[in-house]
Amino acid sequence: MTMTGKERAALRSECNQLKPTVHIGTEGLTPSLAEALDDALRTRELVKVQLNKSADVTAKEAANTLAKRVRAEVIQTIGRTATLYRHNPDIKRKAGALPPWRV
């Protein structure tokens, strides 16, 4: 399922308040990193990923690779930071409640 421009723009505005949850270090894009990202996406849906200065890939390359591995969508990439989103239908939502990434 691909997102509309409006949905992507709404999520981009949410990215500003997020702190990086997953950090890519000198080890690069390891299976354990993808697993940690998968767990974060399962509980929060919208996750910010920060690249270490010594990482050997660009943020855009890392974001695209990770998005494929965890079946997520890249919302934005700015500098050494990328934000990914994956909807989780199992999260219980109440009308008027905060989205899972704000909790």
Image (cartoon, helix red, strand yellow):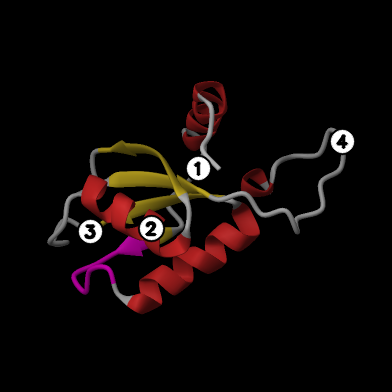
Give the percent coordinates (x, y) of residue 53.
Answer: 16, 56
Q: Which of marks 4 and 1 is nearer the N terminus?
A: 1
Q: How far apart are marks 3 and 4 (CA)?
A: 38 Å
Q: What residue type is labelled 4?
A: Ala
Q: Please tell me which residue is depicted at 48% across the width and 30% down the height of the picture.
A: 12
Q: How far apart are marks 1 and 2 (CA)?
A: 22 Å
- Label 4 SS: loop
- On screen, residue 85 versus residue 93, left or right, reads left
Q: What residue type is labelled 2?
A: Lys
**Residue tagged 1:** 18
Q: Please tell me which residue is depicted at 61% across the width and 61% down the height of the picture.
A: 42
**Residue tagged 2:** 68
Determine the image quadrant of residue 22.
Answer: bottom left
CB atoms of marks 1 and 2 within 8 Å = no
Q: What range of the chain is rendered magenta?
A: 23-29
Tell me if mark 2 has few (under 14), some (14-19) or many (20+) residues whose alpha carbon lies within 10 angstroms of its own. few
Q: Earlier in the sequence, mark 4 or mark 2?
A: 2
Q: How far apart are marks 4 and 1 (CA)?
A: 22 Å
Determine the image quadrant of residue 67.
Answer: bottom left
Give the percent coordinates (x, y) of residue 44.
Answer: 61, 54
Is 52 located above or below residue 81 in the figure? Answer: below
Q: Earlier in the sequence, mark 1 or mark 3?
A: 1
Q: Nearer the viewer, mark 1 or mark 2?
A: 2
Q: Please tell me which residue is depicted at 47% across the width and 33% down the height of the picture.
A: 16
**Residue tagged 3:** 52
**Residue tagged 4:** 95
Q: Which amino acid does label 3 sit on?
A: Asn
Tell me if mark 1 has few (under 14), some (14-19) or many (20+) residues whose alpha carbon lies within 10 angstroms of its own. some
